């Protein structure tokens, strides 16, 4: 990386017209005293959140020459040396001397590719009049390392694939209250959402290209963010584990049972390897394990965890779309609806009953069951029976059944049935 090349890159990013992103629910603070860090899987929209923030700064009167944007995956910057990072500000000051010493907004994409980035950001934060925004594709890097590398100077924001309201915005759809036609459109849009998933690039792609893009994306994540980053010695076992976890959304995982299954298939591995590889998937934001809703840590440890994937469409390169249970996809959508804003999530399991999602696991606020269709009497009875069973554990807790296809039946007191599309829009749960 040399100063003259940096001038070309900075000139290009400063003078080009910013893309017009579709608005996301997450809005980044622009006057925080912290280094704003975005964490999450690749292609979840982190860079476009940068664009939205830069456009917002411009609309508030910030001169474009006060905004620096660099992507450390830009091949023109390779190789990046630690001692060269200071050239960024020097190149900018030579390009725009009138802005020397004035406040700057610095946006750095894929910062993990710059060696010594931690010390560089600490120095900028402590000595310059700057607001810093950084992204990286590895949650391992931006949760574990930033906590120590930036030493209390950062504020992290998790970036997920599109929520259902954001999916509607990408499709140019909006719910109109008190309209049966609009309600029908929302229900149909939910079916599309559960078929396509929430990765912005996939949502905007032509249908014929989606699976190709997903395959390329999963391969990139597998080799770059897992095998290469963690120096995985047995990539075949890791790929089998990835297929197992992504292909069975909203399912409990027993490491002991999975170990025996893999061994019966002739795979050489240990339980420690499985636990370590599961940790890699979690650290890379691909899966979210949630515990059973028990206050006792011993009981939590003794029971299997339930796994949700960050996006059910990631299973399609491994499992045909039609083979991924749509009810499980809906359950994952409901989980992600809450996981975007809170982490105190659990599930509840008994001998004959299960609650799909518990908010505030050790002191339940809500018991939530999710079903694609409860038109069949057997399914209805199973879901209602489970919610009735859970009630005495926390009498004040809300009990909800979230379903796409419903039947006109009387509901026991204290239990509420909510249309799935309505629930994912944040309506009808009170």
Image (cartoon, rainbow, N blue to C red):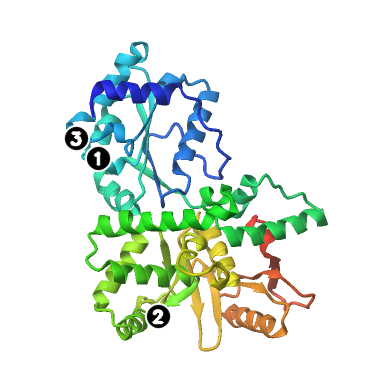
Check disc 1 and report the residue beneath it. Answer: 118
The answer to whether the residue labelled 1 contacts the one labelled 3, judged by CB atoms less than 8 Å apart, is: no
Mark 3 vs mark 2: give the one in front. 3
Residue that numbered label 3 is attached to: 82
Which sits in the foreground, 16 or 354? Answer: 16
Residue drawn at (33%, 80%), measured in percent from left and top?
Answer: 262
> Local crowd at mark 2 within 10 Å, few (<14), some, or many (≥20)?
some
Question: Viewer-proximal residue, 428 or 197?
Answer: 197
Left/right placement of residue 421 relative to residue 211 reads right
Residue that badge 2 annotates? 303
Q: Residues within 10 Å of mark 1 (few under 14, many from 20)?
A: some
Instruction: State the residue lying farthest toward the front.
Output: 208
Which label sits on residue 388?
none
Question: Rounded to the nearest whole Å, what is the CA distance between mark 1 and mark 2?
Answer: 39 Å
Closer to the observer: label 1 or label 3?
3
> Quarter holding the C terminus?
bottom right
- Residue 423 lies, in percent from the top left, at 65, 60
Q: Residue at x 57, y 63 (%)?
A: 334
């Amino acid at each position: 990386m040399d100063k003259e090349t940096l001038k070309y890159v900075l000139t290009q990013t400063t003078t080009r017209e910013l893309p017009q992103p579709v608005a996301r629910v997450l809005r980044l603070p622009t006057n925080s005293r912290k280094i704003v860090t975005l964490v999450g899987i690749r292609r979840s929209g982190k860079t476009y959140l940068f664009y939205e923030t830069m456009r917002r700064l411009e609309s508030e009167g910030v001169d474009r020459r006060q905004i620096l944007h660099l992507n450390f995956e830009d091949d023109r910057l390779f190789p990046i040396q630690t001692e060269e990072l200071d050239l960024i500000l020097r190149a900018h000051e030579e390009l725009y001397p009138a802005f020397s010493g004035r406040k700057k907004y610095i946006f750095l994409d894929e910062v993990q590719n710059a060696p010594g980035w931690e010390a560089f950001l600490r120095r900028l934060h402590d000595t310059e009049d700057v607001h810093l925004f950084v992204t990286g594709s590895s949650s391992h890097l931006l949760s574990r390392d930033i906590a120590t590398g930036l030493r209390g100077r950062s504020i992290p924001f998790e970036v997920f694939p599109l929520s259902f309201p954001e999916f509607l915005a990408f499709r140019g759809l909006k719910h109109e209250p008190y309209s049966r036609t609009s309600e029908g459109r929302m229900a149909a849009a939910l079916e599309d959402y559960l078929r396509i998933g929430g990765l912005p690039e996939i949502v905007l792609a032509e249908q014929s290209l989606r699976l190709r893009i997903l395959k390329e994306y999963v391969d990139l994540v597998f080799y770059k963010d897992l095998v290469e980053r963690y120096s995985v010695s047995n990539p075949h076992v890791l790929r089998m584990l990835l297929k197992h976890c992504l292909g069975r959304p909203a399912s409990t995982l027993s490491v002991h049972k999975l170990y025996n299954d893999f061994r019966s298939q002739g795979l050489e591995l240990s339980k420690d390897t499985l636990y370590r590889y599961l940790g890699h998937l979690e650290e890379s934001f691909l899966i979210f394990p949630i515990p059973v809703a028990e206050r006792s840590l011993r009981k939590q440890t003794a029971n299997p965890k339930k796994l949700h994937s960050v996006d059910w469409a990631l299973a399609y390169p491994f499992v045909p779309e039609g083979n991924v249970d749509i009810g499980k996809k809906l359950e994952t959508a409901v989980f992600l609806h809450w996981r975007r804003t809170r982490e105190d999530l659990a599930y509840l399991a008994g001998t004959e009953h299960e609650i799909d999602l518990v908010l505030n696991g050790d002191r339940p606020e809500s018991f939530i069951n999710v079903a694609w269709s409860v038109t069949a009497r057997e399914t209805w009875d199973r879901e209602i029976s489970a919610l009735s069973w859970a009630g005495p554990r926390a009498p004040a807790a809300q009990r909800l059944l979230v379903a796409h296809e419903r039947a006109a039946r009387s509901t026991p007191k204290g239990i509420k049935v909510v249309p799935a599309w309505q629930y994912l829009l944040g309506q009808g749960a009170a």
